[in-house]
Amino acid sequence: MSRIAVDPGRPIGHLDRNVFGGFIEHLGRCIYGGIYDEGAAVADERGFRKDVLALLRELRMGVLRWPGGNFVSNYHWADGIGPKDARPRRPELAWGGEESNRFGTDEFLSYCAELGTEPYICLNMGTGSLPGRSSNAPPTPRRSRGHPGSRTTSGTSGSAPTTGRSRSVTPSPTPLPWPPI
């Protein structure tokens, strides 16, 4: 018979915190009604559920991935920046619903900051150039530079990246330590 003994008093190495990453997707109640619930008694002024936030803080995740899964195949990061009431509502092709973009790129970055975790933003490599999108050029990921999908590190005034940032809650570039593809 085999036996495994765990001795917490005898460390044999360091385990990278990023092993304990997380993943959130717009599926079921993971986002809306899960981590984000505008106007609910359990939510803060940003719409983040305080109870869920407290529990997730305990996990000390190194990285949090979003939007991920099937949802990312139709999501465009630029739809989730700027004032919530000005964001486009889009058909959600993966699950057959409608995406309000009330929890978008800006909220995800704020949520990660609140958790003390690094953001990992998945980019849409499928329908990023559908008619009606805010940009017809497919995004080119850059490590630790600008908003997701920005094609320059610091655009000139009026360029696509700076115009998008001016609508954003975070008007300066946000470091992205993980290549978003």
Image (cartoon, rainbow, N blue to C red):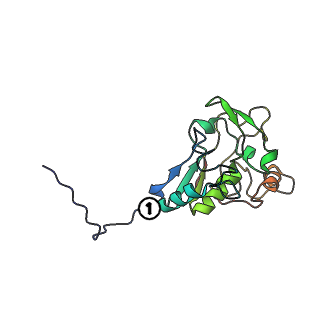
Image spot of residue 109 (x, y percent): 66, 56
Residue highlighted by disc 1: 16
The residue positioned 56% from the left and 39% from the top of the image is: 69
The residue positioned 76% from the left and 57% from the top of the image is: 169
Image spot of residue 118 (x, y percent): 58, 59
Q: Can residue 36 be seen in this view?
A: yes
The residue positioned 78% from the left and 31% from the top of the image is: 131
Q: In which quarter of the image is residue 124?
A: top right
For residue 102, side relative to residue 15 (left or right):
right
Q: Which residue lies furthest to the front in this view?
A: 41
Under mark 1, the amino acid is Asp
Badge 1 element: loop
Most foreground residue, 116 or 33: 33
Q: Residue furthest bottom?
A: 9
Image spot of residue 90 (x, y percent): 73, 35
Most foreground residue, 10 or 136: 10
The residue positioned 29% from the left and 67% from the top of the image is: 8
